[in-house]
Image: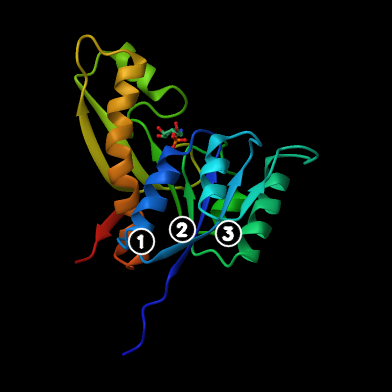
């Protein structure tokens, strides 16, 4: 019987990298048939890069310096990704909006995690937005990236209750707990070829 192909990931980060860590751990535990070919950061001092190095994963610091515009930066990103023969691009706290150059290069093959129940509270400071609005529940969303900001087809969501005493910090903590379960699950589904996208809808195949 033909052996199943190992999915080749690139993880793009800007910060702490707890979601990167969750994916590294899931792969190490044999839960996902994937390899992280590289971790790319626009922030040279992101702690996520240390996590990658500790696991022997190649890292690329890709700062937004000397590029004419967002599209030029993204064209350089696409080159890096192509050189690693990447099947799936994972945005794990990558705090940049992608241009059409990236989105068109990897159709339905870029995943983002957002700390709210989309389409509510798109953009920055989603937890603050949820608290300010007074919602009783928030959560996180893994979605494919399209041309908009936090607008692409939804893959998975998880809900957390918002308590009266929650602060941005406590709500973020609860949401991250769910993120660390949700994101590896979405990557696993992709790696198994079980995500079928039709228009806005993502069907999870058995
Ligand atoms: C995560 O909570 C993720 O939802 C959020 O950044 C955090 C990164 O944490 N992403 C966004 O807000 C994107 N709009 P991490 O670096 O510890 O994985």
Query: How crowded is the residue under tag 2: few (<14 C-alpha within 10 Å), some, or many (20+)?
Result: some
In the image, 77 versus 175, the foreground residue is 175
Task: Find numbered disc 3 in the image and state the secondary structure of the residue it sits on.
Answer: helix
Query: Which quarter shows the N terminus?
Result: bottom left
At x 78% / y 40%, what residue is drawn?
68
Task: Find numbered disc 2 in the image and state the secondary structure of the residue it sits on.
Answer: loop
Q: Nearer the viewer, mark 3 or mark 1?
A: 1
- The percent coordinates of residue 142 (x first, y second) are 35, 44
Which residue corresponds to mark 2? 109
- Distance CA(mark 2)–CA(mark 3): 9 Å
Q: Which mark is residue 2?
A: none
- Looking at the rendering, which quadrant does residue 99 occupy? top right
Side of 130 where 96 appears, left or right: right
In the image, 126 versus 69, the foreground residue is 126
Query: How crowded is the residue under tag 1: few (<14 C-alpha within 10 Å), some, or many (20+)?
Result: many
At x 30% / y 18%, what residue is drawn?
170
Task: Find numbered disc 1 in the image and state the secondary structure of the residue it sits on.
Answer: helix
Asked whether the beta carbons under mark 2 and mark 1 sit within 8 Å of each other, the answer is: yes
At x 27% / y 27%, what residue is drawn?
174
- The percent coordinates of residue 75 (x first, y second) are 69, 53
Q: Quadrant of ligand 1?
A: top left
Q: Which mark is residue 105?
A: 3
For marks 3 and 1 on the same chain, the one whose residue lies earlier in the sequence? 3
Which residue corresponds to mark 1? 190
């Amino acid at each position: 019987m033909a052996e199943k192909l190992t999915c080749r990931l690139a993880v793009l980060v800007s910060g702490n990298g707890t979601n990167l860590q969750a994916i590294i751990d899931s792969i190490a535990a044999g839960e996902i048939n994937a390899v992280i070919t590289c971790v790319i950061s626009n922030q040279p001092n992101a702690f996520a890069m240390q996590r990658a190095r500790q696991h022997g994963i190649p890292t690329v610091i890709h700062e937004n310096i000397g590029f004419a515009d967002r599209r030029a930066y993204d064209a350089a990103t696409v080159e890096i990704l192509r050189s690693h023969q990447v099947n799936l691009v994972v945005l794990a706290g990558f705090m940049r909006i992608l241009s059409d150059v990236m989105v068109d290069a990897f159709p339905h093959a870029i995943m983002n995690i957002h700390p709210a129940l989309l389409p509510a509270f798109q953009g920055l400071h989603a937890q603050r937005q949820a608290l300010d609005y007074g919602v009783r529940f928030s959560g996180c969303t893994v979605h494919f990236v399209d041309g908009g900001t936090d607008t692409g087809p939804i893959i998975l969501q998880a809900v957390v209750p918002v308590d009266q005493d929650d602060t941005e910090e406590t709500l973020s903590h609860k949401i991250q707990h769910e993120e660390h379960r949700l994101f590896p699950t979405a990557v696993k589904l992709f790696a198994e070829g079980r995500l079928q996208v039709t228009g806005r809808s993502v069907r999870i195949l058995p």
